[in-house]
């Protein structure tokens, strides 16, 4: 019987045992699925920000129209907020009080002329306390608009001061328009807004899958210790089977179990949570590479252990640490820069990055190629060292 | 140390067996012994030459040599720590030897000689089965490791299940089995591929009497069918009942080898007197040792094991000496010479006490 057939035989036996062991199935499939469901439901609705604002324009001037139509209208067109008009200040305040709106913009009478003549300008922002975030965003929008107005006022005042003579209303308007049209000295240009944009359901499905993938892979490899404990390893070694064949069999078994678990999770989260994993071929390549990486890292960690308990503790600690650093509990975009950089040293970080790339511009399989290559290299390098070291675990 | 004696291993048919009714009657299987030459004239299956194994300062095996012939059951009898398991581990290629040679049908056996292990069936001392698999699944898995497949595997699994009395429970998980049933499966796995050599490492340790008897019957039947068997044990009665020849091992060395009859004869026609005593046991031992005609005295917690040429003639003097030394004699047994006496003679200790 060839070594490969014996390795497959051992893998099939391991797989059968894993399926019999319901706790392993719960750990590999049910737990990550449940956590992904919980996280996406708990965090999803509040994280998908949307505000309802009401505007009362008591001024009706040009600058007020800019604020209403261009600034707030732009936010509305971006889908961030619904903006409605109220005829009076009382109506706007009542809308907030009744919960029909999160915040109210009150544009006072004389707003435009005051801005153009350099006089102080007052805007009122009303918000309800339970909807603090919506009010904060409204305040930020108004403040940013106010900075622009201040710039215009500064330009008008400067020209007036330099000319040494009073400016006419026409002058005010001309200078204000020129200042408003001037490009800002510093501009932030967003060029990656469509990259790595996993929705929360997909993000948590993927992050829980990669987190528990490590546990699934570890459980398969830890069965070497179980075989030793129950004496079956010694019995297999007394048969015409080499130690290397046993290790290959264990790796194949762990790979098969991980593949089953990940495939089940992808399908289940797609159906139950609405996760959008991306192009199937690209996702399959990422899953394959991630499993190889998980097996490699686990084999390396286990190769240093002297007992089953030590191996279990070490692999769990490493798995959790890599998951945290790799950004499985919060998108790395929300993490400090250092964490985002550190995540690139983990399979978890590259897996999530690869999935994000699949969702980015183009979104073809090729976009995930860098992540797939990095994951494979991680897995093969750590796995090779781990297997060489782990041969002592299956020595007669 | 050759022997012309036939196996003394026939099972006692009066003993109750744990084997189920579907199992074949092992005693009725064809017995070829009558037509075959004495075991030591048959082809050599296993040859072990000058095995040595050292663990640091401890030399666990020191120059062990023996041969096992076709259809022969060879017993390695010795206490725990005597070197039995170390020897058997080297024989089946599980342990690297320091020096020495092991051959199976002339082919070298070693840790790296993977293919050569196919001719060996190994039954470890501890259970080595998968508790979450059924009996049949265990057998199929190990059978395939040895290259069995298809109808051959199916037939052998059925035969072995019948042999070990587990046909009715073949589909049940092992974790639901009694200890004795698990032991029988542990042995059955070793038999599955019809090995040339079967290695049984203390297979009855911790087994209830019923299952133990079934195991001994099975082993005896295998020997009669022509399988070469290496059987390690520290139970004298098992060695006497099963083994064509016995090697008495102690301290990593084989101290004597032969049939039970040869071994008993080698220490002379001596009786054994066992005194149950209390009080000053050490003084009693010294006093008995001084009695003319007493050859050896083994001293244990509350017993004296005394070897004498003629127990009846010396019994009175032995009792007087023991009591005169301050001990109270609470019981006396006079025992016919057996392997225990041989062991005591060779090592100065009783095997039963050494084995504990």
Image: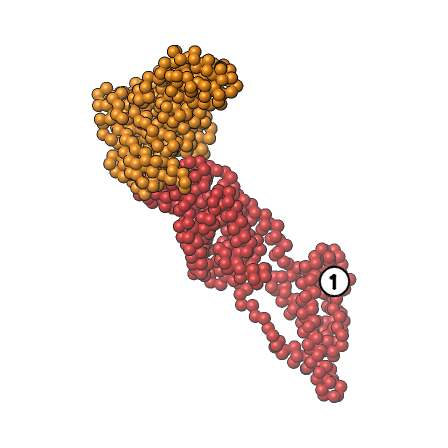
Chain colours: A red, B orange
Q: Evaluate whether residue A127 shows in this view.
A: yes
Q: Residue at x 37, y 30 (%)?
A: B250
Residue shown at the point (51%, 42%) measured from the top left: A309
User: From the viewer's perspective, is A1 left or right of A115?
Assistant: left
Q: Nearer the viewer, residue B304 or A325?
A: B304
Residue B287, by quadrant, is top left
Residue corresponding to mark 1: A126
Q: Nearer the viewer, residue B112 or A97?
A: B112
Foreground of the two, A158 or B279: B279
Residue A386 horizontal/vertical position (percent): 43, 50
- Please identify the quadrant where the C terminus of chain A is shown: top left
Classed neighbour count for the residue bearing mark 1: other residues with Cα under 10 Å, few (<14), some (14–19), many (≥20): many
**What x and y, as percent, mark residue B75?**
33, 27
Taking the spot 69% from the left edge, 74% from the top edge, the residue there is: A149
Instruction: Please provide percent x and percent y for residue A325.
Output: 55, 56
Whether residue A256 can be seen here: no
């Amino acid at each position: 019987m060839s070594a490969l057939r014996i390795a497959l035989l051992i893998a099939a036996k391991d797989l059968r045992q894993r399926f019999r062991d319901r706790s392993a199935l719960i750990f590999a499939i049910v737990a990550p699925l449940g956590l992904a469901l919980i996280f996406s439901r708990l965090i999803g609705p509040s994280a998908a920000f949307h505000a309802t604002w009401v505007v009362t324009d008591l001024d009706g001037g040009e600058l007020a129209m800019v604020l209403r139509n261009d600034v707030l209208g732009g936010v509305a067109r971006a889908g961030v907020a619904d903006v409605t008009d109220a005829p009076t200040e009382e109506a706007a305040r009542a809308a907030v009080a009744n919960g029909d709106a999160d915040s109210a913009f009150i544009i006072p009478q004389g707003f435009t002329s005051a801005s153009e003549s350099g006089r102080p300008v007052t805007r009122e922002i009303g918000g309800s306390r339970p909807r603090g975030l919506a009010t904060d965003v409204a305040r930020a929008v108004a403040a940013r608009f106010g900075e622009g107005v201040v710039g215009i006022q500064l330009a008008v005042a400067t020209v007036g001061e330099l000319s040494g003579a009073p400016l006419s209303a026409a002058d005010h308007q001309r200078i204000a328009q020129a200042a408003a049209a001037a490009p800002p000295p510093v501009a932030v240009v967003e060029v990656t807004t469509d990259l790595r944009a996993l929705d929360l359901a997909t993000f948590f499905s993927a992050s829980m899958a990669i987190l528990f993938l490590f546990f699934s892979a570890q459980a398969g490899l830890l069965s070497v210790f179980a075989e030793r404990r129950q004496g079956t390893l010694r019995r297999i070694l007394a048969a015409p089977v080499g130690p290397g064949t046993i290790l290959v069999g264990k790796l194949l078994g762990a790979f098969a179990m991980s593949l089953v678990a990940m495939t089940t999770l992808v399908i289940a989260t797609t159906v139950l949570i609405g996760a959008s994993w991306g192009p199937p071929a690209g996702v399959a390549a990422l899953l394959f590479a991630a499993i190889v990486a998980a097996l490699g890292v686990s084999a390396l960690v286990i190769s240093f252990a002297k007992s089953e308990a030590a191996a279990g503790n070490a692999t769990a600690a490493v798995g959790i640490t890599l998951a945290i650093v790799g950004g499985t509990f919060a998108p790395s975009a929300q993490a400090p820069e250092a964490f985002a950089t550190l995540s690139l040293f983990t399979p978890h970080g590259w897996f999530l990055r690869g999935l994000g790339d699949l969702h980015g511009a183009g979104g073809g399989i090729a976009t995930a190629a860098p992540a797939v290559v990095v994951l494979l290299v991680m897995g093969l390098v750590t796995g090779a060292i781990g297997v060489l070291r782990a041969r002592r675990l299956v020595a007669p | 140390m050759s022997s012309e004696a036939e196996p003394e291993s026939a099972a006692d048919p009066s003993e109750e067996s744990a084997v189920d009714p579907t199992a074949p009657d092992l005693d009725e299987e064809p017995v070829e012994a009558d037509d075959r030459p004495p075991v030591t004239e048959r082809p050599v299956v296993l040859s072990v030459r000058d095995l040595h194994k050292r663990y640091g300062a401890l030399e666990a095996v020191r120059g062990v040599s023996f041969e096992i012939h076709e259809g022969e059951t060879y017993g390695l009898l010795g206490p725990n720590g005597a070197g039995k398991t170390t020897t058997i581990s080297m024989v089946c290629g599980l342990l690297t030897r320091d020096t020495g040679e092991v051959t199976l049908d002339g082919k070298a056996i070693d840790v790296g000689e993977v293919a050569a292990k196919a001719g060996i069936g190994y039954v470890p001392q501890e259970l080595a089965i998968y508790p979450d698999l059924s009996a049949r699944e265990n057998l199929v898995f190990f059978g395939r490791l040895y290259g069995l497949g298809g109808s051959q595997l199916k037939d052998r699994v059925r035969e072995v299940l019948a042999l070990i009395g587990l046909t009715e429970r073949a589909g049940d998980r092992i974790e639901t089995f009694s200890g004795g049933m698990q032991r029988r499966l542990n042995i059955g796995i070793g038999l599955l591929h019809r090995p040339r050599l079967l290695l049984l490492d203390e297979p009855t340790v911790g087994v209830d009497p019923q299952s133990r008897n079934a195991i001994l019957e099975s082993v005896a039947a295998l020997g009669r069918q022509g399988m070469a068997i290496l059987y390690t044990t520290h139970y004298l009665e098992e060695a006497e009942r099963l083994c064509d020849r016995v090697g008495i091992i102690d301290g990593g060395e084989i101290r004597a080898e032969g049939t039970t009859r040869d071994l008993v004869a080698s220490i002379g026609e001596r009786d054994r007197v066992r005194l149950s005593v209390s009080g000053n046991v050490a003084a009693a031992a010294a006093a008995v040792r001084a009695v003319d005609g007493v050859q050896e005295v083994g001293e244990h917690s509350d017993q004296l094991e005394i070897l004498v040429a003629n127990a009846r003639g010396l019994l009175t003097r032995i009792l007087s000496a023991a009591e005169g030394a301050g001990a109270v004699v609470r019981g006396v047994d006079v025992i016919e010479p057996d392997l225990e006496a041989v062991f005591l003679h060779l090592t100065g200790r009783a095997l039963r006490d050494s084995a504990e």
